[in-house]
Amino acid sequence: MNALGTLWILTLMVLINLDVAGRNLFGAPVRGVTEMVSLSIVGIVFLQLADTLRTGRFTRADVLLDRLKRTAPGWSDALQALFHLVGLGLMVVILLASWQPLAEAVRIREYVGAIGDFQLPVWPVRLITLLGLLATALCFALLALMDVRRLLARRRCA
C-alpha cells in the first residue's frame, strides 16, 4: 500500500508539471488536475498510514517512553500496548464511521469537478480510506499483541 501511495505521488507530480507546462506553453491546462490532487491527498495518506505505523514513524512524543525503556522496561511494554490498543480502538471507530459516507457516495454517484468539463468519482478514494483504516487497525492489533507478549516474557524471566 505504501508503494502504491508513492507511485500515486509520482503520478501527481507528473500531472502537475504537465498542467503547468500546458498552461504556460500552450495556454491549455490539463483538465481536472486540481480535483485529482485534492482527492489524492486523502487517498495517499490512508494508503501509507499502516506502513508509517509499522516502521515506527507515527508522530508521538517518546520522552516518557524512552525513559521507561531504560528504567522500567515492563512499564514501557505496558504503556506501548495501551498506546497500540487505543490506536486500534480509534481506527475501528473511524472505520465504522466511514462506511456510511462510502455507501452514500456510491448511491448518489458523488463526484468532484464540473459537469461537461471534468468529473471524478469520490467513492474510490473513500474505499481506499477504508482499506487504509483496516490495514492500520490490523497493524495496531499486531503491535499490541507483540507488546503484551514481550511484557509476559519479561514477567516470566523476572
Image (cartoon, rainbow, N blue to C red):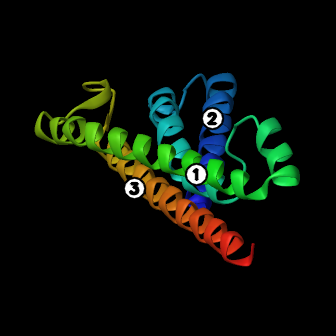
Q: Of tags 2 and 3, which is closer to the observer?
A: 3
Distance between the alpha carbons at the discs numbered 2 and 1: 21 Å
Image point (49%, 50%), residue name: 85
Q: Amino acid at mark 2?
A: Ile
Q: Amino acid at mark 1?
A: Gln
Distance between the alpha carbons at the discs numbered 3 and 1: 12 Å
From the viewer's perspective, is residue 23 above or below residue 41? above
Q: Going by the image, does 27 lie left or right of 137?
A: right
Disc 3 residue crowd, few under 14, some 14–19, many 20+, Cα 10 Å: some
User: Residue 16's quadrant in the figure?
Assistant: top right
Q: Which residue is mark 1?
A: 48
Q: Which residue is mark 3?
A: 134
Label 2 or label 3, whichever comes before in sequence order: 2
Image point (36%, 38%), residue name: 94
Q: Amino acid at mark 3?
A: Leu
Q: Evaluate whether residue 125 shows in this view.
A: yes
Badge 3 marks a residue whose secondary structure is helix
Label 3 or label 1, whichever comes before in sequence order: 1
Q: Tell which of 30 and 1 is nearer to you.
A: 1
Q: Which residue is mark 2?
A: 16
